[in-house]
Amino acid sequence: MPIHPFTLTIAASPAAVFHHLADIEQVPRWAPEFCESLMLARGRWLGFTSLGDLYLELAADARTGVIDLRAGDEREPACRWLFRVGAGAEGGTEVDGEFHGPTGGGGVDSAPQVDALRRALEDLACAMPIATDGAAPPVAARLAACPAA
């Protein structure tokens, strides 16, 4: 299974970022290129995704900041996203993650999903509100690169 690591800094509190990423119902909002919509089917989340209709599972541990999102068919996950959400060294939140792409050596290309995920997280970094507890974190300057809303 190919592994694609990434790191992203978001100018928002770790709690806000974790809460947003850890809510499976938010996936279509922060990753619309990957998951267009979700519905409950037989007690499981079914996502209408760029890889086809896939069952999604999400496990999140607020104590460790780890979020584990898996997508696959009824039997087993085909791909997996692991996120670690924590305080950034310069303020804001650092999201370290890995995308574990589909194995299927039969011509399955995980690059589009990796690119879509990276773009989605960059968009999230631009969309998250900046903390207003006196002084904005230094990473707020990075938002200057975000497109105007």
Image (tube, rainbow, N blue to C red):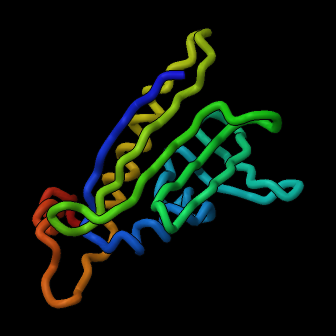
Nearest the camera: 119 or 69?
Answer: 69
Position of 98 relative to 36 (above/below):
above
The residue positioned farthest toward the front in the image shown: 63
- Identify which residue is drawn at 23% across, 86% down: 132
Can see residue 149? no
- Identify which residue is drawn at 26% across, 81% down: 131
Q: Position of residue 94 (x, y in %)?
A: 29, 57
Number of dots carrying numbers: 0
- Asked if residue 108 lies left or right of residue 16, the reply is right
Nearest the camera: 69 or 149?
Answer: 69
Quadrant, the C terminus = bottom left
Q: Position of residue 27 (x, y in %)?
A: 55, 57
- Identify which residue is drawn at 45% across, 50% down: 83
Position of 82 relative to 102 (above/below):
below
The residue positioned farthest toward the bottom in the image shown: 134
Q: Position of residue 4 (x, y in %)?
A: 40, 31
Can see residue 25? yes
Q: Position of residue 143 (x, y in %)?
A: 18, 63
Position of 11 relative to 136 (above/below):
above
The residue positioned farthest toward the top in the image shown: 106
Quadrant, the N terminus = top right
- Identify which residue is drawn at 67% across, 46% down: 48
- Asked if residue 140 lies left or right of residue 17, the reply is left
Position of 103 relative to 133 (above/below):
above
**For residue 58, what is the image quadrant?**
bottom right
